[in-house]
Amino acid sequence: MTLAPFHLAFPVHDLAAARAFYGGVLGCPEGRHSDHWVDFDFYGHQIVAHLAPDECGSRTTNPVDGKGVPVRHFGLVLDMETWQRLADDLTGKVDFLIEPHIRFKGETGEQATMFFSDPSGNAIEIKAFADMARLFAN
């Protein structure tokens, strides 16, 4: 099955900070933009940072495998090699909410994961499966 790119719009407090983070730190090419929003190519998916400072900063978490996972978050599922390169590259550049690690070890849902926030407090999860066929397995 070929996956279609997703589109996600989210609030940011400052467009310059969003450009520095998504473009500079994460390496996402910038697309269309205005004075109020900026498109980014997030590994082939379209994400849009909208200037909306009053909408930023939710921090509710739920326990998952012994960690406080941000309830509101978005992210990607990558292959293991790409995930590891990104984890290595981001170390020292972002403050991890949850450090890169393997969760659900030995279980069907075993996966590599990491969580960090953008400058506006939007939580991002990047994960990977050694066996992508287990993405939806229970």
Image (cartoon, rainbow, N blue to C red):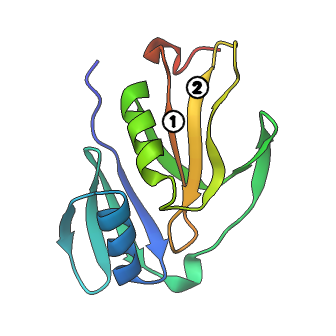
Kind of residue sitting beneath label 1: Lys
Q: Quadrant of residue 80?
A: top left
Q: Residue 126, how many percent across, how many down?
A: 49, 42
Q: Residue 29, how many percent across, how many down?
A: 21, 59
Is residue 2 placed above or below 124 in the rendered structure?
above
Q: Which mark is residue 58?
A: none
Say if residue 111 shows up in the picture.
yes
Is residue 73 placed above or below 130 in the rendered structure?
below
- The C terminus - image quarter: top right
Q: Residue at x 78, y 47 (%)?
A: 62
Q: Secondary structure at mark 2?
A: strand
Q: Residue 39, how many percent across, how many down?
A: 26, 65
Which residue occupies the extreme left position in the image? 32
Is residue 16 placed above or below 109 in the rendered structure?
below
Kind of residue sitting beneath label 2: Gln
In this rendering, the count of numbered labels is 2
Q: Nearer the viewer, residue 123 or 26?
A: 26
- The N terminus - image quarter: top left
Judge from the rendering whether residue 49 lies leftward or rightward of residue 131; answer left or right.
left
Could you tell me if the residues under marks 2 and 1 are in contact, i.e. CB atoms within 8 Å? yes
Circle 2 crowding by C-alpha within 10 Å: few under 14, some 14–19, many from 20: many
Q: Residue at x 31, y 76 (%)?
A: 37
Q: Residue at x 29, y 65 (%)?
A: 23
Q: Secondary structure at mark 1?
A: strand
Residue located beneath label 2 in the image: 111
Q: Nearer the viewer, residue 89 or 4?
A: 89
Q: Residue 94, how many percent across, how many down?
A: 52, 61
Say if residue 79 shows up in the picture.
no
Q: Earlier in the sequence, mark 2 or mark 1?
A: 2
Residue located beneath label 1 in the image: 127
Judge from the rendering whether residue 119 lies leftward or rightward of residue 4; answer left or right.
right
Real-space CA distance between mark 2 and mark 1, rounded to the nearest whole angstrom: 7 Å
